[in-house]
Amino acid sequence: MRVIVLGAGVVGTTAAWYLARAGHVVTVVERREDAALETSFANGGQISVSHAEPWANPAAPAAILRWLGREDAPLLFRLRADARQWAWGLRFLLECLPARTLANTRAILSLGLYSRAELQRLRAEARIDYDQQTRGILHLFTEAAALEHAARVGERMRALGMERVLKTAAECVAIEPALAESTVTIAGGEYSAADESGDAHKFTQALARRALAFGVTFLYGRTAARIERDGDRVSGVVLAGTDGGETRLSADAYVLALGSHSPLLAGAAGVRLSVYPVKGYSLTLPLRPGDVAPVTSLTDEAHKLVFSRLGERLRVAGTAELNGYDTALNDVRCEALARRAAALFPRAGDRAQAQFWTGLRPATPSNVPIIGRSRLRNLYLDTGHGTLGWTLACGSGRAIADIVSGVAPEVDFPFVGLPENLRPRQRSREAPARETQPAE
């Protein structure tokens, strides 16, 4: 079939790759001048299956109240005269109920484990290097009470199949020796040895080049202005170019992977999506010879920040701010990242060359992404991945390619709108119709 993928972030690009591998003729539409220049550009870098517990959990409402009035709060609601924000917030509170949290955790974990395995296969198949590290992720706790709570939660997570091993403060330093320089007292940690890290931007651009050589068409500098309908099907998509002109494309199937902008385009076509932009921040520090910087990826649970070594750079990322589509940098929140990085790793990075960035994560209230077929029979959804877009991208891409192809996905996940006549997937890997190892 001819398939149009809307969006060339890590989610859209992986979907395009798997669709092409399944034999479809794929065109990717992206409003920026290259792949992965927005939310996938400078994220935290973690493949964090161990982070399957969603933001919406029983402890979240009390934490949000505790953080009210703090400009540097890890999770900050900036209330606006925005009905979508209020509706999203109320649904978020509903998802904090214990039964909902458990169901959402199961779904995210299942997709995360599948996605990590798909990433490892794709990495070997396409020979992509993206400053990846396979040293696991270490979750740090600075208070004994928080560590004790994590131990109780960890028991439930392990029962679901999530690997989280409790570590003493000394064991944390043994896993990541750079912590010996820290001015922060560490109470202990949890270690997930199977998790990974890497540069999502570098990965996505490399995969886009592979996909281009494989036959995928990328239309950069084109904005999907509107979806045209014919009854319960999409008949075409109208694109606006940088010159102000419009063109119309048609295909047999369409995959919506526009991140935070997905509900705007879908809503105009009568498809409602509970996805809202959640602004995250990152700091990238170039490393110098002699710097004492971490190699293992870390999560600072107290401040909800992640630290990832990306070659000769240290990436620090986190926080969540609900403020519509605003992408302006907030000096207070930027300084909070820099201050915490200096406290944990005082001899890591050239702070004079610090680069700050912000991007909009497409979040559902449950943190469970929306994957499957919409009420329009040939419009497929691959969006709403929130803070886990990099973690879940390959699994989502493989699953949506299966669904478009009329094949039942292998992973146990609450897909939306699945047709009843999906056939089982063949156990053997598909033989590619074209060369899969092109030179860059």
Image (spheres, helix red, strand yellow):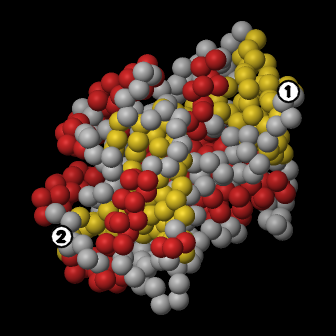
Where on the picture, by quarter, is residue 101? top left
Residue labelled with disc 1: 246
Mark 2 burial class by Cα count in 10 Å: few <14, some 14-19, many 20+: some
User: Is 354 or 284 nearer to us in this picture?
Assistant: 354
Does label 2 or label 1 sit earlier along the sequence? 2
Residue labelled with disc 2: 187
Q: Residue at x 13, y 64 (%)?
A: 144
Q: Do labels 2 and 1 touch, CB within 8 Å?
A: no
Q: Residue at x 63, y 37 (%)?
A: 258
Q: Position of residue 82 (x, y in %)?
A: 45, 22
Disc 1 is placed on an element classified as strand
Where on the picture, by quarter, is residue 50? bottom left
Where on the picture, by quarter, is residue 208? bottom right
Q: Residue at x 84, y 68 (%)?
A: 439
**Amino acid carrying mark 2 in the image:** Ala
| Left or right, residue 71 beside residue 200 | left
- The total number of labels drawn is 2
Q: Is residue 356 above or below residue 370?
A: below
Q: Position of residue 437 (x, y in %)?
A: 79, 65
User: Is 359 or 342 nearer to us in this picture?
Assistant: 342
Give the quarter of the figure containing the N terminus.
Answer: top right
Q: Does residue 433 appear anywhere in the picture?
A: no
Q: Nearer the viewer, mark 2 or mark 1?
A: 1
Q: Is residue 402 above or below residue 92?
A: below
Mark 1 burial class by Cα count in 10 Å: few <14, some 14-19, many 20+: some
User: Is 192 or 219 nearer to us in this picture?
Assistant: 219
Gap in angstroms between the C-alphas marked 2 and 1? 58 Å
Q: Residue furthest bottom?
A: 290
Give the quarter of the figure containing the C terminus.
Answer: bottom right
Q: Position of residue 381 (x, y in %)?
A: 60, 32
| Left or right, residue 152 beside residue 353 | left
